[in-house]
Image (cartoon, helix red, strand yellow):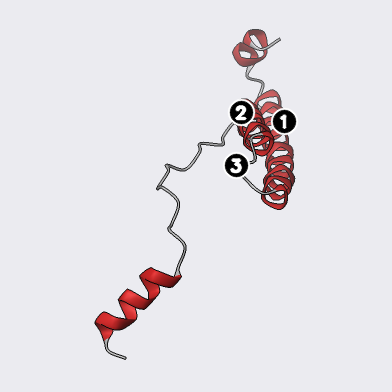
Amino acid sequence: MDQANILQYNAETQPPSPPCRRATRLRTAFDVRRLIARTINQLMRDEIPEGKAAKIGYLANILLHAIEISEMEDRISKLEKGDTAWTERNA
């Protein structure tokens, strides 16, 4: 089978690839909340399989926990340095 036939064979046997989407920014708890809400809506509209929604939910939970720990570490670090301006703003 030559190269042209291989490419044609692959194009005929492979399902179409999904439209290209930008990666979702997941830096804050709010970003994770939006992802979970979007995933729930997609699941309820049968746009994604249950297994994929479960994996997204599992990973979102891990990421949310990591974000919370990171924010806590940042707050503790600032308190240990005696950053009084930061503590007054965020009290």
- Amino acid type, mark 2: Arg
Closer to the camera, 59 or 73? 59
Residue at (59% x, 30% y) in the render:
31
Q: Amino acid at mark 3?
A: Glu
Q: Position of residue 43 (x, y in %)?
A: 67, 38
Q: Quick check: 23 left or right of 47?
A: left
The local secondary structure at tag 2 comes to helix
Q: Classify residue 10 by image quadrant.
A: bottom left
Instruction: Identify the residue position indicated by label 3 in the image.
Output: 47
Sequence-first tag of 3 and 1:
3
The CA distance from mark 3 to mark 2 is 17 Å
Q: What is the x, y in percent for residue 69?
A: 73, 37
| Marker disc for residue 34 | 2
How far across and down, in percent of the image, does residue 11 sit?
A: 36, 69
Does residue 6 sit above or below 75 in this rendering? below
What is the quadrant of the N terminus in the image?
bottom left
Which is in the foreground here, disc 3 or disc 2?
Answer: 3
Question: Residue 91's x, y, as percent?
Answer: 71, 9
Specify which label sits upstream in the sequence, 3 or 2.
2
Query: Residue beneath label 1, please?
Result: 72
